[in-house]
Amino acid sequence: GEGGPVSEDDTKRFEKIQAILETIPGGQDALATMKKYRIGVTYKAGVGSFYDPETNTMVLDTAENPETSALTFVHEINHGKYHNEGLDPDATTVTRDEYIKARVEEEAEGAVLSIEAKMELEGTTVDVSKATFPQEQEYRQAYNDAIAAAKAKDPAASKEDLNKIGRAAGKKRVVKGFYDGEVVTSTKPPTPYPEFYGKDWDNQNGVVTK
């Protein structure tokens, strides 16, 4: 298979998302990753959106509007990329702290990619105002502050360089938020990510926790 939509119905739904993604660099990257690793895309109702490494398939929730779904796709495809490139840590071979760090950073990176894609789409005719992401305000604040500081230092700095500086600062801030428990998991009960992945490591290593 070439990856992408699994059924005819999936194809119809995905067309709208693909059209949105094709208009921005972050979306084009995500689509290229899908093709490269032949990641399947299927829709289900009410289960939330997630990447399933067992089947190398992304499940998108039919409840999301196409704009939000496109941005969710950018986040979830990052998990697919990590899995296919062997970047996700093996809980049985790394320490608990290493596992937590790698997992939290992967999750934060997915969030960052969605925020950046949303900001790219704000420069187009696509309305993404309904899509919101954890740490989005914090990211934007850090992004804007870093760019303002860089401009003050070097008024001739290029737009590209400023964008890079802003993105680096934004990402750093989001990673911090994921570590500090400002963001919690969507699981029940909502749990700070380091705690969630710590328990995951414990389970995979047969450690009994209360």
Image (cartoon, helix red, strand yellow):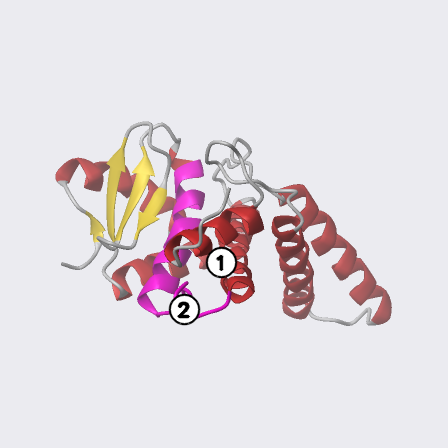
Going by the numbered disc 2, the residue's amino acid type is Leu
Residue 210 visible in the shown view: yes
Compared to residue 25, the image places residue 128 above or below, namely above
Q: Position of residue 112 (x, y in %)?
A: 55, 53
Circle 2 residue: 87
Q: Residues within 10 Å of mark 1 (few under 14, many from 20)?
A: many
Q: Secondary structure at mark 2?
A: loop
Q: Residue at x 57, y 51 (%)?
A: 194
Range covered by the magenta-colored residues: 68-95
Circle 1 residue: 103
User: What secondary structure is the stretch in magenta mostly built from?
Assistant: helix
Q: Residue at x 51, y 46 (%)?
A: 196
Of pointers 2 and 1, the one earlier in the residue sequence: 2
Residue 24 visible in the shown view: no
Going by the numbered disc 1, the residue's amino acid type is Arg
Q: Position of residue 75 (x, y in %)?
A: 44, 50
From the viewer's side, name the closer residue of 118 and 77: 77
Q: Is residue 5 left or right of residue 25?
A: left
